[in-house]
Image (tube, helix red, strand yellow):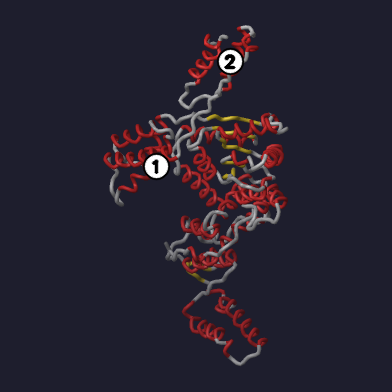
Amino acid sequence: MMIKPIGLEEFASVSPVAGPSAASTVSQLTDEKKRRLVWFLQWKSHEPGGLKSFAYTLVGRNPERLGSHTMHRLGFDVHTYFEGPAYELICDELNSHPLGCIEKIKAEFIELELRESFVDLLDYSAEEKDAQKARSFERRRNFDAEIGPKKRRQSAVTFLYTCREQALVMPEFLAGLCKNPGANWDLPYFSRLVDALEIALKEQTDGAAKTAAPTKISANVHDALDFAHQTKGLVVIHGVERMGKSEAARMWQAAHPEKARLISLSAATTDFLFYSEIFEALGCGEKKAGTSTELRSRIRETVQNRDLALIFDEAHCLFGLSEKASIKRLEYIRTEFVNRGIPVVLIITPQFAKRLKDLEAKTSFNVNQLRGRLARWVTLPPKPSRSDVECLTRFCLPGIDQESHALMTNFAMQSEYPFASVRHAVNECHALIAPGEKISPPIISKAIGHALFTASQLAETIPAPAPARRVQQRPSRRNFEQPPEAMHEASNAVANEIPTSRNGNSGLIFQESLNRAQSPALTV
């Protein structure tokens, strides 16, 4: 390193970039690479630390890029001096003229600094003080010219310190790229900025991919998200709870910040809170607008380019406290996003389908409006495979021996929620060992014991609800006068209404229902 690295606190602070500003800029850019980078920078501006932290990382990882175009073209090291035409070109590129022949003008420079520092202490009027400061500033700027053209010579290190000072405002420059479509993407003090941003985006993608286990379930989720962004359609990802759907979606969005935004819905009690969650996920502004209408307007401005896919996690929260609120939200998703060609992904559990069916039965809501616009329905398996559990175990506990791996996998496969059981046992393992201690089979066994005890206590305190069984009423005499074919059809209808049990004994339940319906004991 030829110069002192820049500290994080030295960079300028800048406000997050509002979604509508970025969308307006993207709509006027024809370069696909720059369009993607604008959305990447807009997402980064809303991350912890914002563009200040991002600029610190960008310069810290690319110190060799500091310097003007001429400096990089000619090459330099700590012993390099630029003079003559090269000196002039570098000064013009940096819009700065570093002092040449420092030893000869050192005394005069100190005198000027003292004069400027103490001017406020003298008995001058305000006009005289301003005039004195202006003369001092002008003389400082002309120092280099006073030395003479033959003495124009400066070291590469001095020029690098000039670049270092100018790089402190890089966060403001990056924010300006998102707000001004006509901005110049070339920095005089940092070489090949676009290439550096492309590398940063790739590092973001690669880094996010390492934050979750590459299971088959996550691969199915990622394929569905890729399909939604490519086709600009409506995609539904359906699976039971605790299967890793949300984590897979979160990892995909973090790996592709230029393609999507993840909206984690909650049980919002009002429309304003519902729109606020979308507003904040898209980064539509620093402060929330005053009304639901204003929120919707800013949301529309942000997604109008159809570049971003909207991933709604916990989509069953689209159903509000009333049927009217539920219909309003579902219709908003359909008319505001799906009909406009904006990619939408709904991550749902079985309760979503149940609530949708109940809503259709109780109201005049036409669910076919959603069915007709569905591009793909992805159903995840009801339980992860053993290979997926093994993959998650290796990811959470890298380097464990084969015996420990088998213990954890067998425990998870016997649990109702294998993925959640693995993570619970892993947390117990880390709580049992000291820092730096290796996880061994006894530790695994003890952690599994703690996890099983917690599960048993939970089952006793909050027992799982029993599957609903339809109560059979004693048939009337008129029912026995029906022909056997009619009785058989009625029995099938009753059996079809009985829900499937969690252990898959739907055939047994159906057979029992059929036997009861045709039992001779019911004959009068």
Say which amino acid is labelled 1. His
Foreground tag (1 vs 2): 2
Residue 492 placement: quadrant: top right
Badge 2 marks a residue whose secondary structure is helix
- Quarter containing the N terminus: bottom left
Residue at label 2?
Answer: 492
Which mark is on residue 217?
none
| Mark linked to residue 424 | 1
Whether residue 72 appears in this view of the structure is: no
Q: Is residue 146 left or right of residue 399?
A: right
In the image, what residue occupies the spot 42% across and 34% down?
A: 418
Q: Is residue 351 visible?
A: yes
**Side (left or right) of 229 relative to 7:** right
Q: Circle 1 sits in a helix, a strand or a loop, which is it? A: helix
User: Residue 224, image x and y in percent?
Assistant: 56, 34
The residue carrying pointer 2 sits among few (fewer than 14), some (14 to 19) or many (20 or more) residues within 10 Å by Cα, namely some
- Relative to 462, does residue 110 appear above or below in the rendering? below
Q: Of marks 1 and 2, which one's residue comes earlier in the chain?
A: 1
- Three-letter residue code for mark 2: Asn
Q: CA distance from mark 1 to mark 2?
A: 43 Å
Considering every residue shown, the one lying at the far front of the view is 524
Query: Percent position (x, y) of residue 35?
Result: 63, 47
Vertical placement of residue 227 versus 144, above or below: above
* Vertical position of residue 403 compared to residue 273: above or below: above
Comparing 64 with 236, the one in front is: 236
